Amino acid sequence: TIVGVSSARELTTTRMKAIQVRLKEPFFHEYWRAAIDRVRRSRFCQGGGPDKWRADLDWFLRPDTVTKIIEGKYDDRYSQTSVSPSRNELDNWADQDDSVDERLTQPKVERPELIDFKGGQTC
């Protein structure tokens, strides 16, 4: 339960099937806890947007929702939250799965320079 987020009153057969499907997806399996933490910190997900929409379990179980949450789509706009999960988020929320540690210890790929095509300057 997250304050401000719609609570599911019943774990229906449809919801159970969706949970089973999502947990078979490696990204969801690894990041669902970090995504819940980010929803907890998002005023938008708690009804703070212009339409007063609130997150719920059915929305969370949609195929791309956790990916969008982790990418920062639902973060508060003033927040300095990084696009990808922090090391601390992974340490706190990732399953006891060796693949998390492997991913964190692999060399980071450098980001290519971004070019402002109008001025030709790099960003």
Image (cartoon, rainbow, N blue to C red):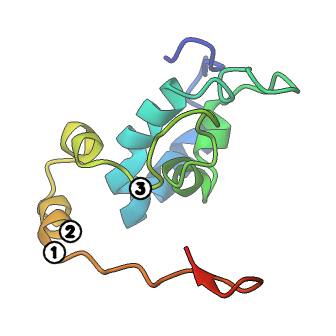
Kindly identify the residue that appears in the image at 21 percent across and 47 percent down: 95
Earlier residue among tags 1 and 3: 3
Q: Amino acid at mark 3?
A: Ser
Q: Which mark is residue 106?
A: 1
Q: Residues within 10 Å of mark 2 (few under 14, many from 20)?
A: few
Q: Amino acid at mark 2?
A: Arg
Measured as percent of width and height from the top left, residue 68 is found at 59, 54
- Within the image, what quadrant is residue 74 found in? top right
Please state which of residues 120 and 19 is positioned toward the viewer in this rendering.
Answer: 120
Measured as percent of width and height from the top left, residue 102 is found at 13, 69
Disc 2 vs disc 1: Cβ atoms closer than 8 Å?
A: yes
Residue 81 horizontal side relative to residue 90, left or right: right
Q: Secondary structure at mark 3?
A: loop
Q: Residues within 10 Å of mark 1 (few under 14, many from 20)?
A: few
Measured as percent of width and height from the top left, residue 41 is found at 50, 26
Kindly identify the residue that appears in the image at 49 percent across and 47 percent down: 19
Q: Residue furthest right?
A: 51
Spatial distance from mark 3 to mark 2, Cα to Cα? 13 Å
Q: Quadrant of the C terminus?
A: bottom right
Please state which of residues 83 and 16 is positioned toward the viewer in this rendering.
Answer: 83
Spatial distance from mark 1 to mark 3, Cα to Cα? 15 Å
Kindly identify the residue that appears in the image at 36 percent across and 54 percent down: 29
Spatial distance from mark 2 to mark 1, Cα to Cα? 5 Å
Q: Amino acid at mark 1?
A: Gln
Q: Which mark is residue 103?
A: 2
* Residue matched to label 3: 84
Please state which of residues 121 and 5 is positioned toward the viewer in this rendering.
Answer: 121
Residue 33 horizontal side relative to residue 51, left or right: left
Looking at the image, is 36 positioned above or below residue 101?
above
